[in-house]
Image (spheres, grey):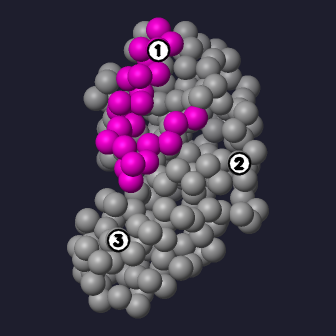
Amino acid sequence: MKKAFIYDLDNTIYAVSSISKILFADLFALIENSTEHDGNIEGIKLELQRRPYQLVAKEFCFSENLTGAGFDLLNNMSYDDAIHPFPDYNEILLLEGDRFLVTTGFSKLQWSKIRGMKIEHDFLEIHIVDPSNSIRTKRDVFADIIARHGYDISEVVVIGDDPKSEISAAQELGIETVLVDKTSQFPEADVDHRVTGFSEFRLLYQNL
């Protein structure tokens, strides 16, 4: 029986693309007006909707100056316009078990999105892994949750959209994984289960 479900936020609970034009307007403008990166503007924009800023900056060879300017923008950013979870979000509320939310990003921004969706009370705990002020990783948070609550590894599931982030962190600990891959973006990803949405996800676990 599964006792704990650990969810990612961005592109798992909601689509970053639904808010990216507003959310990243200033950051995109900063990058477009700079020559201090590898020049792949569209690639940078795409990855910023999927992965932490620090990793994108490193991959696309941002200068120290550009990295710092983007960091300052994001560190003080919040999202105050309408934001909605995926339409089938409520499916996860129908599963018995403890729910945890673990997301990587800038704390102020991540909390503004969580509160904007009004989902903060749907989870037993919410953890924001903020590389700007901590060396903790998702792997560390997963291990801490398991230890503090006394779960057996077999009783926990991690659900996310990124094979190189929460999925990889879970696999390192031997936790069962579910990849939410709505557009078959990662056909080669090594995961325990693959779903296109939460309706399909609930069917996996409602009888376990």
**Residue to which mark 1 is pinned:** 148
Give residue 68's mark.
3
Q: x%, y% of residue 132?
A: 38, 53
- Classify residue 123 by image quadrant: top right
Depth-wise, is mark 2 or mark 3 nearer the camera? 3
- Choose the circle earlier in sequence order: 1 or 3: 3
User: Is residue 25 shown above or below 95?
Assistant: below
Q: Earlier in the sequence, mark 1 or mark 2?
A: 2
* Label 1 to label 2: alpha-carbon separation: 25 Å
Q: Which residue is mark 2?
A: 115
From the viewer's perspective, is residue 191 above or below residue 56? above
Q: Which residue type does callout 3 highlight? A: Gly
Would residue 107 appear left or right of 112 to someone viewing this image?
left
Identity, as a three-letter code, of the amino acid under mark 1: Arg
* Dot 2 or dot 3, earlier in sequence: 3
Quarter containing the C terminus: top right
The answer to whether residue 91 is visible is no
Q: Which mark is residue 182?
A: none
Q: Which residue appears at 54% of the width and 64% of the height?
A: 76
Q: Residue at x 53, y 79 (%)?
A: 26
Circle 1: element type: helix
Q: CA distance from mark 2 to mark 3?
A: 27 Å
The magenta segment: 126-150
Q: Nearer the viewer, residue 27 or 202?
A: 27
Relative to residue 42, is residue 77 depicted above or below? Answer: above
Residue at 56 percent across and 78 percent down: it is: 25
Image spot of residue 11 (x, y percent)? 54, 52
